[in-house]
């Protein structure tokens, strides 16, 4: 069970790279995690899983199937949510049991609690998985594991033994103490009078003690109890309560025989522990929080789909109805926001896109949408689209405008060039590269000069790429690049559309429309020469 995982099939090791902080920021990973949970601990768990870009198709299919089951069986999710608190408590107990300095009685109690929770978790998971016809390999393996434990004869004996042992321990309801005083009425010794199965109430002994103050010179003669322990009025350990410390020792000694007998019963269960289950807490949390959010989207009619995963070497992607997941999150929050779906393909003839179009025409939105799509799919989550087939990338690299504070030393152009060089030093032909208005911080001539060499390098590298830019000239004469530069991936021009002078936010393959778009806008707002001249005549 120690090797079992809902993120990795048995026998598979992680084959992943970690997203850079820049890429996490450019894809709004923090914002996405914030929407999934308000709990900081859960946020960090989800982010840490998502930052690891897993590239193995078999692993991704395994995750996708597990997630598909969890989405389709809400009752299963609720069962698991109930168990998560017990598993979390079990994890806390693990620390207690490692405390060798703890008194034997507390070690015993913790061990009993551990086994009791273990029984509840096994029974709960077995019940939850038995009630649902799960199809994924991951949940089937978990079901087989807990079912095999549940059906073992030893498990039934364990349940009964733990029940009896817990009852015995719970029978101790109170402890009666005796305190010896010195001549100045200071406590010098404390001992146990009795260990009781009933809560302490006002007894004849207590009544006599309380009535002492009303009786002149009348003392109870004698005290028939043993096991006295010296009470030190000054603690040798800073912050230690000497009375409590000594009482603990006394109780432990008094319960010695009971503890020894009960621990003897537990000795046959030394190899039983539920900590293998606690290792699944982060994975359960990850799937459950995502499934809850995806269900909200489905209830609002926002399209999502289970992705199809192809081989890495294909370096392809075929998606219908893709939208930016961040926009969908605004709809989930009941904000009115139009989502414009788009189709896009990566293949040998269209693996590198130079995307042009008007400002605020959707270039950045679509560039980010592609990055988030790959990120979600390779985590096993449903895709924000109508349908998608893709081969996994080995990592996602983004080149978005930098924070001005990071450009002080090198200047903006120097900083952008440095980051771009670092990307090409790490990326392979199986990577995903996303450039957002790169090299726009310098003069047009300088930016275009560098960008043309970058496009040639992209052709040579062959990685799936979207390079969105305001430099329409960059997307012209791409046939020359495809002909002159060696490579198996062609560069293509992608534009964001204009309909009747308005941004349509639709994308399609076509040569850049820088001049024609400007003409449309000029006509719409009456700023062509003919329109302006006509206005002047009528002044």
Image: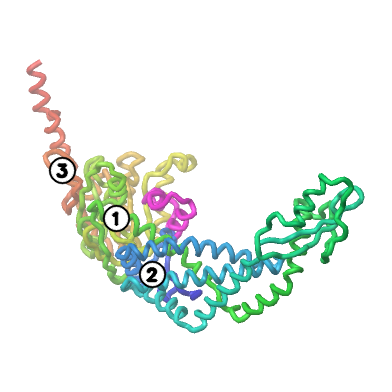
Front one among 108 and 182: 182
Q: Assess disc 3: are there few (<14), some (14-19) or many (≥20) residues with their C-alpha within 10 Å of its C-alpha.
A: many
Please report whichever mark, 3 or 1, sits nearer to the chain's N-terminal start: 1
Classify residue 260 as left or right of residue 405: right
Considering every residue shown, the one lying at the far right of the view is: 183
Q: Residue at x 37, y 44 (%)?
A: 401
Classify residue 523 as left or right of residue 305: left
Q: CA distance from mark 2 to mark 1?
A: 36 Å
Q: Is residue 30 magenta?
A: yes
- Residue 318: name its quadrant: bottom left
Span colored in magenta: 19-48
Q: Do the residues bearing badges 3 and 1 touch, measured as CB atoms within 8 Å?
A: no
Q: Assess disc 2: are there few (<14), some (14-19) or many (≥20) residues with their C-alpha within 10 Å of its C-alpha.
A: some
For the C terminus, the quadrant is: top left
Pair 3/1: label in front: 1
| Tag of residue 128 | 2
| Tag of residue 101 | none
- Residue 84 is situated, as x and y percent measured from the top left of the image, at 46, 62
Q: Residue at x 49, y 54 (%)?
A: 41
Front one among 26 and 404: 26
- Residue 177: name its quadrant: bottom right
Please report whichever mark, 2 or 1, sits nearer to the chain's N-terminal start: 2
Element class at badge 1: helix
- Residue 363 is situated, as x and y percent measured from the top left of the image, at 26, 47
Q: CA distance from mark 2 to mark 3?
A: 53 Å
| Tag of residue 498 | 3
Element class at badge 2: helix
- Name the residue carrying label 1: 370
Q: Assess disc 1: are there few (<14), some (14-19) or many (≥20) residues with their C-alpha within 10 Å of its C-alpha.
A: many
Rendered image coloring scheme? rainbow
Which secondary structure dominates the residues rendered in magenta? Answer: helix
């Amino acid at each position: 069970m120690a090797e079992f995982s809902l993120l990795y099939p048995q026998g598979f090791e992680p084959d992943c790279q970690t997203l850079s902080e820049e890429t996490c920021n450019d894809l709004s990973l923090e914002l996405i995690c914030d929407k999934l949970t308000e709990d900081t601990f859960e946020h960090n768990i989800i982010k840490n899983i998502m930052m690891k870009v897993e590239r193995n198709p078999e692993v991704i299919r395994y995750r996708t199937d597990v997630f598909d089951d969890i989405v389709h069986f809400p009752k299963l999710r609720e069962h698991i949510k109930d168990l998560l608190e017990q598993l979390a408590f079990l994890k806390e107990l693990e620390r207690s049991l490692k405390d060798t300095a703890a008194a034997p009685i507390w070690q015993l109690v913790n061990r009993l609690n551990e086994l009791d929770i273990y029984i509840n978790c096994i029974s709960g998971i077995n019940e939850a998985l038995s009630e649902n016809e799960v199809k994924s390999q991951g949940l089937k393996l978990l079901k087989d594991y807990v079912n095999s434990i549940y059906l073992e004869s030893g498990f039934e004996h364990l349940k009964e033994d733990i029940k009896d042992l817990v009852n015995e321990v719970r029978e101790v309801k109170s402890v009666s103490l005796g305190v010896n005083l010195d001549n100045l009425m200071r406590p010098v010794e404390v001992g146990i009078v009795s260990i009781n199965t009933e809560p302490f109430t006002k007894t004849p002994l207590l009544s006599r003690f309380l009535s002492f103050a009303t009786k002149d010179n009348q003392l109870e003669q004698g005290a028939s109890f043993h096991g006295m322990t010296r009470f030190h009025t000054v603690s040798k350990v800073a912050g230690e309560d000497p009375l409590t410390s000594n009482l603990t020792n006394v109780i432990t000694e008094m319960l010695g025989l009971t503890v020894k007998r009960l621990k003897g019963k537990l000795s046959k269960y030394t190899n039983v522990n539920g900590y293998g289950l606690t290792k699944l807490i982060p994975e359960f949390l990850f799937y459950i929080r995502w499934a809850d959010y995806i269900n909200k989207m489905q209830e609002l009619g926002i399209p999502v789909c289970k992705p199809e995963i192809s081989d890495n070497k294909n370096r392809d992607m075929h998606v219908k109805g893709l939208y930016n997941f961040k926009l969908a999150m605004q709809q989930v929050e009941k904000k009115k926001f139009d989502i414009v779906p788009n189709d896009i393909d990566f293949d040998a003839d269209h693996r590198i896109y130079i995307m042009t179009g008007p400002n605020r025409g959707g270039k950045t939105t679509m560039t980010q949408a592609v990055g988030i799509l790959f990120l979600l799919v390779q985590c096993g989550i449903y895709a924000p689209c109508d349908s998608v087939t893709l081969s996994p990338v080995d990592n996602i690299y983004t080149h978005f405008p930098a924070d001005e504070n990071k450009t002080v030393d090198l200047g903006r152009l120097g900083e952008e060039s440095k980051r771009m060089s670092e990307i090409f030093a790490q990326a392979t032909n199986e990577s995903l590269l996303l450039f957002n208005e790169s090299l726009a911080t310098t003069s047009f001539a300088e930016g275009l000069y560098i960008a043309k060499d970058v496009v040639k390098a992209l052709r040579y590298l062959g990685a799936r790429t979207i390079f969105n830019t305001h430099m329409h000239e960059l997307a012209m004469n791409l046939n020359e690049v495809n002909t002159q530069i060696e490579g198996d991936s062609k560069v293509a021009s992608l534009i964001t559309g204009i309909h009747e002078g308005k941004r349509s936010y639709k994308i399609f393959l076509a040569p850049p429309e820088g001049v024609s778009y400007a003409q449309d806008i000029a006509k719409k707002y009456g700023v062509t020469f003919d329109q302006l001249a006509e206005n002047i005549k009528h002044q």
